[in-house]
């Protein structure tokens, strides 16, 4: 059965189609949930909640654009709702440096990178994930989080500084242990 037919059947509340849709997209969408959750269990809850919203709103999907992108947006918005009360550091100066973090991929594993991103304070992790990993603009991030673009830039810069420091410390420790 093709994706369009699967979606059409989901619009008719067909449980078998809903199960197939879940099987088709749950692994990819779980990764999205993990980025925006505090831990693994929270990500599982966000995935389940997100699919309930997808099933509820699937009649609004009009086959324009990617279904996966549409579903991803629902899951991100659902996860962000849990952070409504997160305090973002408001800034006045809009000239925050947009420093890139260089990563020596031979020494840093993707698991370690995901771990240190997960360890960021909520406000930094949310902005970092939305801007860097999901490719939203500062304006879009600001609208999604109901903050100013200056605040998104400031929080992104702070997230990058924290990640850079952790990566440099990790690299120093690996270099020291390799020379012993």
Image (cartoon, rainbow, N blue to C red):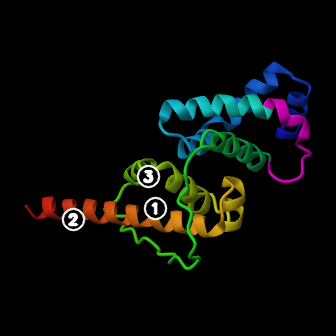
Would you identify the image quadrant in which residue 139 lies?
bottom right
Mark 2 vs mark 1, CA separation in Å: 20 Å
**Is tag 2's residue or tag 1's residue first in the polypeptide sequence?**
1
Q: Return the residue nearer the eye: 34 or 143.
A: 143
For the point 32% across and 60% down, the residue is: 166
The residue that disc 3 covers is 120
Q: Is residue 160 above or below residue 16?
A: below
Secondary structure found at label 3: loop
Tell which circle, 3 or 2, labels the residue nearer the N-terminal end: 3
Q: Are marks 2 and 1 in contact (CB under 8 Å)?
A: no
Mark 1 crowd level (few <14, some 14–19, many ≥20, 10 Å Cα): many
Query: Where does residue 170 sit, x and y in percent of width and height?
Result: 27, 59
- Of residues 144 and 19, the one nearer the viewer is 144
Q: Is residue 119 magenta?
A: no
Please identify, in this view, whether the residue under mark 2 or under mark 1 is nearer the observer.
Answer: 1
Which marked residue is nearer to the observer: mark 3 or mark 2? Answer: 3
Q: Residue at x 68, y 39 (%)?
A: 78
| Quadrant position of the N terminus in the picture | top right
Q: Where is residue 103? Give x, y as percent.
A: 39, 68
Q: Dot 2 surroundings within 10 Å: few (below 14), some, or many (20 or more)?
A: few
User: Which image quadrant is residue 27 in?
Assistant: top right
Residue 99 percent coordinates (x, y): 47, 75
Q: Is residue 122 visible?
A: yes
**Image disc number at residue 172:** 2
**Picture layout, residue 76 above or below residue 43:** below
Distance from disc 3 to disc 2, alpha carbons, whole Å, reads 20 Å
Q: Which residue is mark 1?
A: 159
Question: Please, what secondary structure does the residue beneath circle 1 have?
Answer: helix
> In which quarter of the view is residue 101 placed?
bottom left
């Amino acid at each position: 059965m093709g994706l369009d037919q699967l979606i059409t059947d989901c619009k008719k509340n067909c449980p078998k189609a809903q199960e197939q849709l879940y099987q088709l997209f749950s692994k990819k969408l779980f990764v999205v949930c993990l980025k925006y959750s505090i831990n693994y269990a929270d990500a599982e809850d966000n995935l389940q909640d997100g699919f309930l919203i997808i099933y509820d709103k699937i009649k609004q999907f009009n086959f324009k654009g990617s279904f996966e992108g549409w579903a991803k947006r629902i899951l991100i918005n659902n996860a962000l709702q849990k952070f409504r009360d997160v305090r973002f550091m408001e800034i006045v100066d809009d000239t925050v440096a947009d420093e890139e973090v260089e990563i020596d991929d031979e020494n840093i594993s993707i698991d370690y990178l995901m771990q240190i991103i997960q360890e960021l304070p909520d406000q930094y992790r949310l902005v970092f994930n939305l801007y860097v990993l999901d490719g939203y603009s500062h304006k879009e991030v600001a609208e999604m989080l109901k903050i100013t673009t200056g605040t998104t830039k400031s929080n992104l810069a702070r997230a990058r500084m924290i990640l850079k420091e952790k990566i440099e410390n990790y690299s120093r420790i690996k270099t020291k242990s390799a020379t012993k």
